[in-house]
Amino acid sequence: MSAMSEIPLPQAAKRVVPWWLLRHETMLAAILLVALIVLGALNNRFLTLDNLLNQGRLTTEVGLIALPMTFIIITGGIDLSVGSIVGLCAILLGYSWKNLGFPLPLAIGFSLLVGAAAGFFNGIVITRVKVPPLIMTIATLALYRGLAEGISQARSVRGYPEWFYFIGQENLFGGPAQLWLFLIAIVVSAIVLDRTIFGRTLYAIGNNETAARFSSLPVDRVKLIIYTLSGLMAGLSACVLVSRVTTTRSDMGIGYELDVIAAVVLGGTSIFGGVGTIWGTVIGLAMIQLLKNGLALTGVKGDATIVVIGAVLILSTLVASSLQRRRDGV
Amino acid sequence: MKLGLAAAFLSATLLAGTASAADKRWDGADDLPVNPLACSAGEANAAPAARPYDGGRPTNAADKTGKPITLVDVPKLIGIGYFNATTKGMQDAAKALGNVTVKTDGPTEAKIDEQIKFIDNYITSGVDGILFAANDPVAIAPVLKKALSKGIHVVGYDANSTPDAREWFVNQAEFNGIAKAMMDSMAKEAGEDKSFAIVTSTFTTPNQARWIAEMWAYAQKCHPKLKWLETVEAQEDNNLSFNQATTLINKHGDKLAGLFGMTSVATPASAEAVTKAKLCGKVAVVGLATPNAMKPYVNADCVKSVVLWNPVDLGYAAIYVMRAVVDGKLKPGATSVEAGKLGQLNVVNGSEVLLGSPFIFTKQNIKDFDF
């Protein structure tokens, strides 16, 4: 029997190797560990606490949006408008504070509200008018960015009060302030997805939406909630981003949707719906951010880094899907 | 019914967005002060009062006087002709000095948060100095201050940050100088009471925005009868610039007597649009561009003046300034700095090193330049 465990025959593997070892997330974590060791060996400044915490700071904005995106992709949907919502919320935060005279806390609340409303608008058209999420959010990707540019008149807003920079630049309990926010969001999202009826409904919709409807699951309501949540988190991400870079610009968040979706998909969430975890997304995020950082520190140039990231994305998807097939005994 | 409602809402929001964007002439971003120069060249410009040094200082920088140093250059983006030219100038200077190693690295798109990440990573990896061309003057400040606080020297070129976030800035040409050269050329070529439009990169690009703001201020003071039609965005995209220029020509018809190109992409594309519309001589094209791209249009008499500086010299000067800072030769309060083949460069505005006046390429001199 002990000899059997060393021979990776499909049938034997099914019985001998624990199921969790062949999960996408586990494999990805292993790849991440290898990448960490290699990059750490190549550059002695990579595996310092200071650097790693700093990477946490830099990844929070994309990370906050990746959590609800995991929910959406599990249902078989997509939200391409998140980057534009970041831009719109950032502009409204600055505009309502500087031009409309809102007190800053109110302006923050207002921009979060608009983020949620932008997501709600996506959700309502997707569920009521039955516009496919891809089409609808491509449309609002342009619409929300246009609004951001129109409202801002391309004027940057600067000179926020010092306290506002806390979440983006300061430390709390020895770590970047926004990292704690991100950690809380991760834990809450993971519990919601793993331990609640709401979470199970997401998988049910992604596996078979028609069946979910016949099981009288509130499909449309659930979808409406996740798209609204996606908008809200994009708004939150905008606040963190403005606080980190101290300036509001209408081109903020351009291309975020691709970073977010790359992390979610790398983390093992199936673009066809029904499969995915928050942990996978978090590992996907860490993988992309640490690779970028590690390669930059090792002296790989910006354009080459993008090529390496692309290659790693393809490679880990290949490894994962071949393992998946072996596990399923196909 | 529901579809109709959604469509109505969608178009209403779209209209609101575009209406608010189109309701007034766009005159440059930000509410920063403008400083138009005097109208005629003969009239002496009041020499700016010598301002005290307002740059930042690194904390406990290692003494590397005369020793080899490693620098990194993070431009707005990599892979375009303009920053390839500044990179070449930097490599030339590094070779001339012999004790400087410089590497250019940066985002492939002109995005400020990407640029911040690059600088942040180079702070961690450890360099003696950082050169930058900022995508946003204020947003880049915190990460540059972080570099200074870790004892890394910081010098900017091409696009500035807030002064206290870097030690020196190598200014290729002052905004108001460019604005004056552009507006005077336009008034001369199109006519004092004619209408013109502007093709720029994006409204959020700091240099272009500042030039346009200064152009507006200078025009109000010196060419008040010139009519501003509109400013359109064309990214740094050749096709889009051509299309936008063509649209302007079709939209305004005979009213349009001049086009400004604000980027080295928009200017040749505008000249091409005017050529294709067979309007050479009727629509003047004035703009910022590199001489090689403009030679066909200048030689065909379609474009009379091209405004620019030499980006190779700009990169070259930036390295000499950095070396002088590290060696302690360029200290707060200095009035000039030695820059190799460029000779002595003057210090202006407290903590800026001025490359020189903007240069105007014409049919007579453009053949002498190759970049």
Image (cartoon, rainbow, N blue to C red):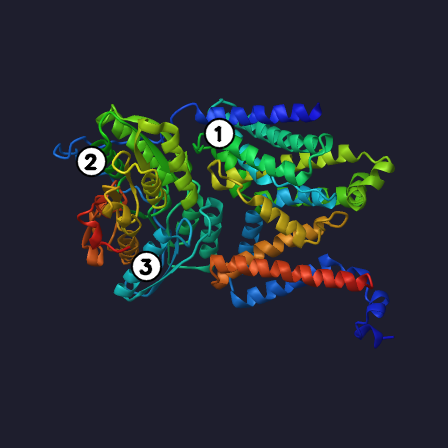
**Pointer 1 residue:** A150
Kind of residue indicated by mark 2? Ala
Residue B49 disc label = 2
Q: Which chain carries label 1?
A: A
**Pointer 3 residue:** B88
Direction from residue B87 to residue B174 in the image, left or right = left
Q: Element at badge 1?
A: helix
Please state which of residues B234 and B104 is positioned toward the viewer in this rendering.
B234
Name which quarter of the figure residue B151 lies in. Answer: bottom left
In this rendering, the count of numbered labels is 3
Measure the C-alpha gap from mark 3 to mark 2.
35 Å
Measure the C-alpha gap from mark 1 to mark 3.
38 Å
For marks 3 and 2, the one nearer the N-term is: 2
Please state which of residues B247 and A133 is positioned toward the viewer in this rendering.
B247
- Both on one chain, marks 3 and 2? yes
Q: Element at badge 2?
A: loop
Instruction: Tell me if residue A281 comes above or below residue B99 in the rendering.
Output: above
Direction from residue A48 to residue B98 in the image, left or right = left
Image quarter in which the N terminus of chain A is found:
bottom right
The residue sitting at 32% across, 54% down in the picture is B86
Kind of residue indicated by mark 3? Lys
- Both on one chain, marks 1 and 3? no
Measure the C-alpha gap from mark 1 to mark 2.
39 Å
